[in-house]
Image (tube, rainbow, N blue to C red):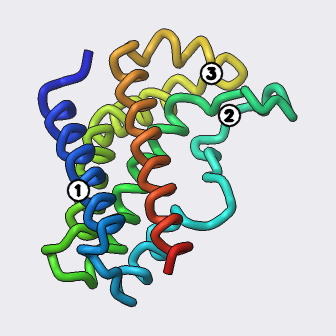
Amino acid sequence: MHGAAWEDAHDLVVRCLRDAKALYQDGEWSVTDAERAAARATGLTGPELPAFDYPAVPTRDVGDPLARPAWLQQAAHAVQVASALRAAAAPLPQTGPLPMLLAAVADLCDQLRPDTERLEAQWAADDPGAEWEAWDLSHVPNSLWSQTIATINVISRLSRFLGSMLLAD
């Protein structure tokens, strides 16, 4: 289903998240002010939900809480998160649980970059308009959909961990 590189990156994220949680919960990791600032700088700890607004697609099912963004919107969001995580981690030392976790999640998100850029160019050329759902189905393989959803889930788990880390301090 997923490529070996994505599977390896996902396994690394799971290990980093598990290890960071254990170190934090066991009191073996005292979060520094710089790490708190980095957690906030990710943009994943605020109360607002991500805006899946790029590329723009026609509004559908206004008010439907189950309506999902287009694949390209979700993938573009994950690629943007990769950049935000790297920028947030840049001021930190390269060792330690938080910079390692942020780097691992950024690497996982970046696995979507080549397909996102390729399909973004195709989207622009095709201009699917109101037919964007059919475009998604015909251009995005199921394995890439699955990889994207799993990556978005990892971002959500990271967000919850960072939020709980900030609330506890």
Camera-nearest label, 1 or 2: 1
Q: Residue at x 43, y 73 (%)?
A: 39
Above/below status of 93 relative to 154: below
Between the residue at mark 3 and the residue at mark 2, the CA separation in whole angstroms equals 7 Å
What residue is disc 2 on?
Answer: 57
Amino acid type assigned to the residue bearing label 2 in the image:
Val
Is residue 83 found left or right of 163 in the rendered image? left
Q: Amino acid at mark 1?
A: Asp
Q: Position of residue 151 (x, y in %)?
A: 38, 38
Q: Which mark is residue 67?
A: none
Label 3: few (<14), some or many (≥20) within 10 Å?
some
Q: Position of residue 98 (x, y in %)?
A: 28, 69
Q: Are marks 3 and 2 in contact (CB under 8 Å)?
A: yes
Name the residue that disc number 1 marks. Answer: 19
Decide if residue 127 is on the left or right side of residue 39: right
Q: Secondary structure at mark 2?
A: loop
Q: Are marks 1 and 2 in contact (CB under 8 Å)?
A: no
Question: Where does label 3 land, which residue?
Answer: 132
